[in-house]
Structures are given as structure tokens and as C-alpha cells.
Image: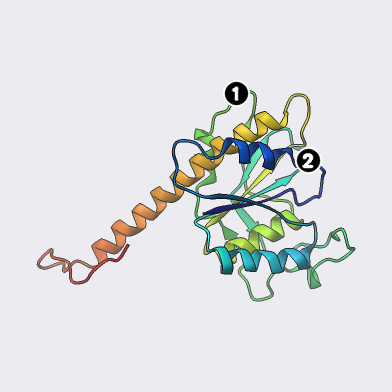
Amino acid sequence: MLPQAKDYRGLPEAGRGKELSKLGLGRDMEVELRILQLPVDYREVKQRVTRIWEDLQPQLVVHVGVDPTAKAIFLEQCCKNWGYGDADIRGFHPERGVCLPDGPEVIASGVSMRAVSRRAVVEGVEVAFSRDAGRYVCDYTYYLSLHHGNGCAVLVHVPPLSPSLPASLLGKALQVIIQEMLEETEKARSQCLVHRKLSLCDSRQGEPTGRLLL
């Protein structure tokens, strides 16, 4: 299951979600695509992200936010726990600018965004790698999602829609990017299973000492 939370700066550009809904994920992927919209509201985001992980238990959450100054699509590798001093649409910001008081300073996605940025090729759209998500509601949401999802989340910053980047092209770009992200997720899961299988083997006999349930 793949819910997608989008557009944290509240810009009126619902075309991205509609285009992706029409396109789907392609490649006959047996993955349910669910698109949700989150408000530019720290407190509301905190509640909704928690419910997403508790109620839906997704395979991967792809957060998509608009960066009005961006000229490319940026794949964000990590997020920060501090520095949230800018107020949201309700004039609120987290106490002391911290996401989770006892949380780690930085959390990184389990998906290699650098690898995805190298493979996700869409004509007319630049896809770039980033390690600074900007310390606003997008970054805040990403941190919470990675915390609740044990690293199974990603954040994509996209430019505003324009004549050079219509909704149809951005929808196609997001489709390609998410396909690559899912492949990276499966690759990481396979590597983890290999390590677990090796750890279950008796080094003297080379025979499994337990069962691995998939």
C-alpha cells in the first residue's frame, strides 16, 4: 500500500495527484496507490501521520511537497529534528522548534535517494538528490513519518506547475520516481532477508537452525 501525502505549502495545484491517480504506478505493480492531502499545519500533520502508519500500515509513504523556488525535482534523503521556527498557516510552530523532544537529531530514509535520482530519467524534468529538506512542514512531516515507519518513507520536493512543467509531465515524473523507489525498497528488503537467513544458519553445519517467516 502506498499513500501519498502532497502539497504541504497549500498551493492550489491538485493536478499532481489527479494525474498520478490516472496514470497509476504502471509495470503491473501489485501495489495499491492511495493519495491523501495534508494541511500546512504542524499539529494536524502530527495527528494524521500517526494515523496513516497505525491504520494503513503502508509499505512506503511518499510525501510530495512544493518548493516555490525549485527548478528541479529534489529527492530528500534525510530530515532534521530541530529548527522549525517558521509558523504554519495557523501561526503555530513546535515548541523550541523541535519535532520530537527525545528523537535523534537526523533520520535518513531507508531508500537510497541518490540511487533513485540517478535512475529516474524523464525527458524534460531534472531529478536531483538533496540532504536538506528546508525545516518547514514538509521536513517536519518527513521526520514524523520516518520515525513511525522505521525509515519506510521518502520526501519529494517538486517545483510549482508551469507551462514548462504541466501536471501531465509532473505526474509522469512522479510515476517513474515512485517505481524506482519501490524497486529500491524491495532491494533493501531482499538484502535484509539474506542477512537474516545467514544469521539463522549454524556456522558449523551450514543448516538452518530456525524458520524465517515471510
Vertical placement of 44 versus 102: above or below?
A: above
- Which circle marks residue 181 in the picture? none
Question: Amino acid under label 1?
Answer: Glu
Residue at numbered disc 1? 123
Which residue is pictured at 68% across the width and 72% down the height? Answer: 100
Q: Secondary structure at mark 2?
A: loop
Residue at numbered disc 2? 13
Position of the C terminus by quadrant: bottom left
Looking at the picture, how far across and down is residue 148, in whole percent? 58, 67
Looking at the picture, how far across and down is residue 175, in whole percent? 57, 37
Tell whether 127 sits left or right of 43.
Answer: left
Q: Quadrant of residue 96?
A: bottom right
Q: Quadrant of residue 12?
A: top right
| In the foreground, 86 or 165 | 165
> Is residue 128 visible to the viewer in this orientation of the structure?
no
Which residue is pictured at 72% across the width and 28% down the height? Answer: 165
| In the foreground, 89 or 94 | 89
Vertical placement of 98 versus 141: above or below?
A: below
Counting every numbered tag in the picture gives 2
Residue that lies at the very extreme toward the right in this rendered image: 91
Question: Amino acid under label 2?
Answer: Glu
Looking at the picture, how far across and down is residue 189, in whole percent? 39, 55
> Is residue 73 visible to the viewer in this orientation of the structure?
yes
Q: Whole-Å distance between the Cαs marked 2 and 1?
A: 22 Å
* Mark 1 neighbour class, 10 Å CA radius: few under 14, some 14 to 19, many 20 or more: few
Tell whether 53 sits left or right of 136.
Answer: left
Q: Are marks 2 and 1 in contact (CB under 8 Å)?
A: no
- Closer to the observer: label 2 or label 1? 2
Residue that lies at the very extreme toward the bottom in this rendered image: 102
Looking at the picture, how far across and down is residue 174, in whole percent? 60, 38
Which residue is pictured at 61% across the width and 61% down the height? Answer: 145
